[in-house]
Amino acid sequence: MASKEAKHTPAQHLEQITTGYTFDEPSIQLGAAIVDSDVHAEAAVRLPLAMMNRHGLVSGATGTGKTITLQVIAEQLSAHGVPVFLADIKGDLTGLSTPGTGAEKLLKRTQSVGQSWAAQSFPVEYFSLGGDGVGVPIRATISDFGPLLLARVLDLNETQESSLQLVFHYADKADLELFNLADLRAVISFLVSDDGKDALENLGGLSKATAGVILRELITLEAQGMDRFFGEPEFDTADLLRSDAEGRGIISCLELPTLQQKPQLFSTFLMWLVADLFADLPEVGDIDKPKLVFFLDEAHLLFNGASKAFLQSIQTTVRLIRSKGVGIFFVTQTPRDVPAEVLGQLANRVQHALRAFTPDDAKALKSTVSTFPISPYDLEEVLTSAGIGEAVVTVMNEKGAPTPVAWTRMFSPQSTMGPSPAGVVEGIVTASPLLADYGTPIDSHSAFEKLSASEPASTNIPAEPGTTETGTAEPRTTAAPPPVGTPPRGRPSQAEIDAEARRIEEDILGRPSSRPPTTRREQPAPENGRAHPPAPPAGQKQQERNEMMDFALKTAGTIGVELVRGLFATQRRRRRRRW
């Protein structure tokens, strides 16, 4: 456990900090040290640019200044030509696009910490998940998202997660593209149908009961309007690695206005971006500055209830991605939100104040103090008394050793602290060159169409909805997408969601649903005209099925061992290179 060093005089303590944070290479200016309750502008606290890919943690109680710290670091990274990715949950970070205002109080603070402050805006690209907001839409295909991350979104247990991996493997081997949720539903529905029972038996690990659970979760996800996050055009993470004409790194800002509706979906989408970068970026080793710094906000959402496989993949990704020039900073309220195996890989720490109001808070405080190097500070006292915009800092120096702990008064942003004025973000998005690439959704020929088109022409069974009388698939009709920035469409009631889930389960399992009916008498939600698809293309060879079974049984319950999938079982793609 961290404890106080032998008694230092204030002068000795100040000299220790000044020496410990003096670097020869370019660095980020975090603020000025506080020693003996006084701010010392001459004792600058810095973070070496070359050490940003050793990852970090920004933590602290709500309202202590974490968001402003992110803004300060993002501004300086951009000025050094380093692209940044961050999530904007409250909308405050849109102020990056607008120069700040030099109010008297602000200038007094900047002078006290030795900051040469000048109002400035920074290059920002605004994104939204599937158009859920104003920014350029970010989407992922189901296949590229992969079974491990999707299982996390659906809140599946480990058995169901393994079964979902088998479904993905079957789709990969059968050339059934999984672009959106409808494609995945079509493949699962086929596997548990009479026409797909042979393929299901060969897979060996997927039961009808498990399929029913997965389908029910997919139905619920769609009914909540979350299906728009999956599909084409898929986002290319190379677009996060850009600079403007002046050589400043572009700050990619993802707005999350509806985070609380499906927190696991949003946090997992952020991890998909990281996994995608890991899968595609080349090895670069130690470099003068990172290619990208990625801030993972609300980090506790990523780890809460995560499976062992998911946690192992995060640990491996964090450990290995630094050699590809990417730094990851987790942002959360307390270090206890991050598993010890991940926390041990975070070399740079910016700890804002903690509040100890309850016994659990007191335990969290002691746990946090124990993770810092031995210091002359009484860290329990400092962390409970630090003011807004102050933090306890320790980083990795150029030699790979931790710097002395420094109670720091942080620098202030040069851009606006708070949202930009109305119309600024909309104007930036409208002028974005990426809007032409990602603004309009695409509905390509994929698993849903392939399975729907395989109805035997000789059958006398009437064509199901969504097919013609000849058994061929009718084109999927997709309503014209709303303009970027429009509010989400109205969602069906919970009773409608439950009714549709019961109908699906009864249809798949051939018995009454285990889900209780709702008390309100409402009509089931429609299935958007989509029927459960009939048989797959005829002529599939038994030998191919046997090979598929052998491979699937060997890979069930594992991560990243499929030939075409990476650490999170995400699909590898051909990319546009920007590095």
Image (cartoon, helix red, strand yellow):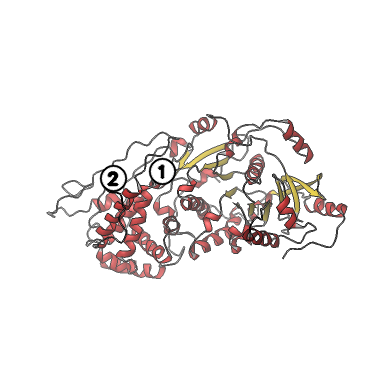
State the residue at coordinates (45%, 48%).
261
Which dot, 1 or 2, sits closer to the camera?
A: 2
Q: CA distance from mark 1 to mark 2?
A: 21 Å
Q: Is residue 563 left or right of residue 68?
A: left
State the residue at coordinates (51%, 53%).
271
Expressed as whole percent of the image width and height from the top left, the position of residue 549 reads 33, 68
Q: How packed is label 1: few (under 14 Cα within 10 Å), some, or many (20 or more)?
A: many
- The residue under label 1 is which amino acid type? Pro
State the residue at coordinates (84%, 63%).
6
Tell me if residue 414 comes above or below residue 216 in the rendering. above
Of marks 1 and 2, which one's residue comes earlier in the chain?
1
What quarter of the picture does the N terminus occupy? bottom right
Tell me if residue 79 comes above or below residue 261 in the rendering. above
Residue matched to label 2? 528
Q: Is residue 245 visible?
A: yes
Expressed as whole percent of the image width and height from the top left, the position of residue 167 reads 35, 61
Residue matched to label 1? 233
Q: Is residue 12 left or right of residue 148?
A: right
Tell me if residue 142 comes above or below residue 411 in the rendering. below
Could you tell me which secondary element the residue under label 2 belongs to? loop
State the residue at coordinates (70%, 39%).
412
